[in-house]
């Protein structure tokens, strides 16, 4: 007879854990593992990484889940490796080979396409993606062999560095460092760069090294987290306010803070601003986010008093 399963006693956890997502796990699998380790009641992540990708994955717990959207919209930085001369059905190593070509690429060619793909560009999202069409993910259509027309997206490649690295067994590889806007598919970028080089390419490695203000050096690996006790794990949790580190700040008096938390606009001599982090003065607790128009502080996402008390005390 099987022993009864031990029920995990959940607890309120508020904050952000920066995970260096390991290879082979989906973002949700990684989230569920960390949620279990922390025994957290509520959790979410700030955008997915494919199972074949590693790197920065901010995991939000408790009150922090209210602000996870902010990092969906954040700029990202990736390091990637593309194999030249082979295109696949998914633009990465998981797909079937659909074409092979001889690689006759020079340093000048690489510099040319580096310039071509830097700045504002248009990109057609891949069929093997989670984008929806009539309520169904595109990858579901792709598995059925159905091609759906996708409109091009406007994205920005803020910085692109391309460098050919040492060939292996006659194979040629391109290292890519990409600082880009939200909505950029690095698989598609690698494929498009391969086409522009005249030989085709597909992604073989992908690592996210930054999202917004969060850097890979701040992250913890899953294996280390598993080896630690509760107290050690808790030390890796960053405060909820770390999600709004780049926001303009406004501090309110106790009376104004109470009204603000009730969703009431406040008036002041503040300049217009789209992204505002609002704090109370006594104590200096994070209250939520807002924007300012014509001297009005307009609430957006707010913490409730119970969350503020749990976080501050």
Image (cartoon, rainbow, N blue to C red):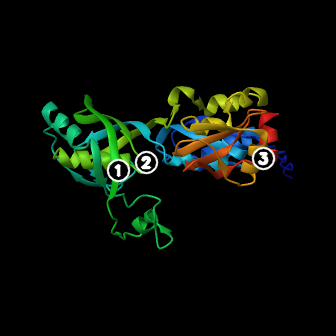
Residue 155's label in the rendered image is: 1
Q: Which residue is mark 2?
A: 182
Q: How far is the residue under mark 2 from the one under mark 3?
A: 35 Å
Q: What is the secondary structure assignment of the residue under circle 2?
A: loop
Inspect this view and state whether residue 13 appears: yes
**Which of the two residues, 35 or 286, is positioned nearer the viewer here?**
286
Vertical order, 41 against 245 (above or below): below
Q: Is residue 204 left or right of residue 34?
A: left
Q: Earlier in the sequence, mark 2 or mark 1?
A: 1
Q: Which residue is mark 3?
A: 258
Q: Earlier in the sequence, mark 3 or mark 1?
A: 1
Inspect this view and state whether residue 17 appears: no
**Which of the two residues, 228 or 181, is positioned nearer the viewer here?**
181
Q: How many marks?
A: 3
Q: Earlier in the sequence, mark 2 or mark 3?
A: 2
Contact (Cβ within 8 Å) of mark 2 with mark 3: no
Q: What is the secondary structure assignment of the residue under circle 3?
A: helix
Image quadrant in which the C terminus is located:
top right
Residue drawn at the location 27% of the way across and 35% of the way down: 173
User: Where is residue 63 shown, x and y percent of the image?
Assistant: 71, 46
Residue drawn at the location 33% of the way across and 69% of the way down: 149
């Amino acid at each position: 007879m099987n022993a009864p399963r031990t029920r995990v006693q959940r607890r309120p956890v508020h904050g952000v854990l920066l995970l260096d997502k390991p290879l082979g796990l989906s973002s949700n699998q990684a989230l569920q593992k960390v949620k279990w380790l922390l025994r957290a009641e509520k959790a979410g992540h700030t955008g997915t990484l494919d199972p074949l990708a590693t790197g920065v994955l901010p995991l939000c717990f408790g009150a922090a889940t209210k602000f996870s959207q902010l990092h969906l919209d954040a700029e990202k930085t990736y390091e990637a490796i593309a194999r030249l001369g082979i295109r696949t059905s998914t633009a990465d190593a998981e797909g079937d080979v659909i074409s092979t070509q001889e690689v006759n690429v020079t340093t000048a060619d690489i510099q040319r396409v580096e310039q071509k793909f830097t700045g504002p560009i248009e990109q057609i999202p891949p069929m093997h993606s989670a984008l929806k069409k009539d309520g169904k993910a595109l990858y579901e259509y792709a598995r059925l062999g159905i091609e759906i027309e996708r409109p091009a997206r406007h994205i920005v490649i803020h910085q692109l560095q391309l460098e050919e690295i040492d060939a292996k067994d006659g194979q040629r590889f391109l290292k890519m460092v990409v600082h880009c806007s939200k909505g950029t598919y690095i698989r598609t970028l690698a494929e498009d760069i391969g086409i522009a080089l005249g030989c085709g390419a597909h992604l073989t490695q992908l690592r996210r090294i930054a999202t917004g203000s969060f850097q890979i050096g701040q992250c913890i690996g899953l294996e280390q987290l598993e080896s630690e006790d509760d107290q050690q794990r808790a030390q890796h949790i960053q405060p909820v306010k770390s999600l709004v580190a780049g926001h303009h700040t406004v501090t309110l008096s106790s009376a104004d803070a109470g009204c603000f938390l009730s969703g009431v606009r406040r008036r002041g001599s503040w300049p217009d601003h789209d992204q505002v982090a609002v704090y109370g003065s006594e104590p200096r607790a994070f209250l939520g986010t807002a924007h300012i128009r014509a001297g009005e502080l307009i609430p957006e996402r707010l913490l409730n008093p119970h969350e503020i008390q749990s976080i501050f005390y």
